[in-house]
Structure formats: structure tokens, C-alpha cells
Image (cartoon, rainbow, N blue to C red):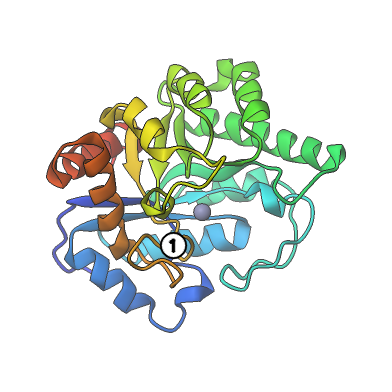
Amino acid sequence: MNANNFSLRHLDVHTHTHFPAYDGDREDVMSRAREQGIGMIQIGSNIKTSKEAVLLAEQYNDGVWACVGLHPIHTHETFHDEHEGVEEPEEFDIEQLKDLSTSKKVVGIGECGLDYFHIKKEEDKMIQKKVFKDHIKLAHELKKPLMIHCREAYTDLIQIIKEEKEFLNECPGVIHFFCGTTEEAKDLLELGFYFTFGGAITYPKRKNGTDYEEVIRLIPIERLFSETDAPYVAPVPHRGKRNEPLFVLEVEKKIAEIKDVSPEIVSRIIIENAQKVFGI
Ligand SMILES: [Zn+2]
């Protein structure tokens, strides 16, 4: 058990330093972030990586937590990613997820949701939708917030959430790496969701891409989080390199700039949000 004094001042609400991408230097990566007071929620993407997320969180007295779930890209077909170490699709295994959730370190269910970037077939979409609904019910049963991933599927995602409204918790959860429109953001705000943003907000705006400045201006800081999604999408000035939780400070800075407040205010409110949503 790693018991060095840790005081929570910042939060990387969605990170994956349990992935094989950090097998060579995981402790250093974790220490660099912890020295700056950066708490981390390690996000599982299937049973194996959910277990690893919980095990990593359990190595620390404080400041590291986990979410467990099945990522939509792992429900039907294999999208092998060497950084993640996932090779086979899985079925939703409620018993194993419930079992993992008995750890005090588990503060949420996910990542789960819809991802139509790789798939076109209606039957594959149906599988993702079913598995997402299963996660909503599990989160309701365990009274934990959802950690939602959504790519090119916001219309369906919002429709499902509305259909399953009776199963939403008072604090339903967090939309990770939100990249929808302002209208979709408004719908999800109204449904009670929080939002988290990462390195992409530090990049120049893409033509036809989400206008992050507009979306972040719309969402109250009281509904915002900062994340890295490490090892992916490193913020400027680390763009193109392996990401790590330390770089969440760049994301906070960008949110502060857009909101026209100090980074200290942003990090303080994010910690308050985390207490409300994740009870940490
Ligand atoms: Zn992720």
C-alpha cells in the first residue's frame, strides 16, 4: 500500500494508467501526478481492464479510484489497440461487474455508451444499445454514476437516456470527452448530466468539429470535469505524445481561460463536483 501524504487539489476524472501503455514506468507516471495533488479515476473498458483499474486503485490509500464497465467498441467485434491490450469482444457480464463493484474504490459504472465510428450495421448498433441499457440499470441498482462514452451517436444516446429515465440516479453521471453540439449539451444538462473535457479542447478548432469554446461556455463550471483519457489525446504542448494524468493541468488551464476565471477556481469547483458525483 502506497501511503505517501496526498492532498487532493486537481482531478483527472477519466484516465487509463492501468493500461499496458504504462507497463514500463507506471509508478513514475502516478507519482508525477500525485506530487501535484492530482487525483485519478481509472476507467475500465472490459472485464480485464476493469479488474486492472480496481487493482491499481487499491494500491493507494487515497487519491486513486476506479470505474468498471464494458466499452461499446468491445461489445461486438475486435478493435485491437496495443495501448489497451484488449483482443476479444465480450458479453455484458453483470455478475463480474457487481463483484468488482464491491471494492470501496469503485465510484462509477463505465465506460459505457455508444460508438458508431467503426460500425455501420444496424445489428451491431442494437447490441451496443442493449449493453448501454444494461449499464444504466446496473448503475441504478448500485446507486453509482455512469461514465459515458459516445462517438457519432448522440441522437441515439439521448433517446435511450430519455427512455430509461426511471432508472437514472439523482446524479446520473458524466459524459466523457463530450464532442456533440450545443443542443445536445443542453439536452444532457437538463437530464442532470455532468461533462468532462480533455486534450482536444487545447487543439485548434476543426472544421465541422465540436466548438469546444462555445460548449464549455454554455456548461456551468458546477457541471464540469477535467480529464486526460491517457494514454490518448495529449493536450498541447504534448500533442502527439503519450498522454499522462499530469497533463490534466493543461486542460484545467484551458477551461479557466474559456470561463475567464483562474485555474485555482476551476480546480476547486471540480473537486467539489467530484464530491457530489463520486462521493470522493
Ligand atoms: Zn477512456
**Residue 63 appears anywhere in the view:** no
Q: Residue at x 62, y 20 (%)?
A: 164
Asked where in the image residue 160 lies, by quadrant, the reply is top right
Residue 9 percent location from the top left of the image = 17, 51
Outermost front residue: 207
Q: Quadrant of the C terminus?
A: top left
Front residue of 273/200: it is 200
- Secondary structure beneath disc 1? loop
Task: Tell me: 70 left or right of 233.
Answer: right
Disc 1 target residue: 230
Q: Residue at x 33, y 56 (%)?
A: 40
Task: Tell me: 162 left or right of 189.
Answer: right
Q: Quadrant of the N terminus?
A: bottom left
Front residue of 249/47: it is 249
Residue 123 percent location from the top left of the image = 86, 39
Residue 252 percent location from the top left of the image = 26, 49
Residue type at numbered disc 1 = Ala
Q: How many labels were placed on the picture?
A: 1
**Residue 159 appears anywhere in the view:** yes
Task: Tell me: 74 left or right of 218.
Answer: right
How many other residues sit within 10 Å of disc 1, few (<14), some (14-19) or many (≥20)? many
Q: Residue at x 24, y 57 (%)?
A: 38
Q: Residue at x 16, y 41 (%)?
A: 268
Ligand 1: does it lie within 8 Å of the C-beta at label 1?
no
Residue 39 percent location from the top left of the image = 27, 55
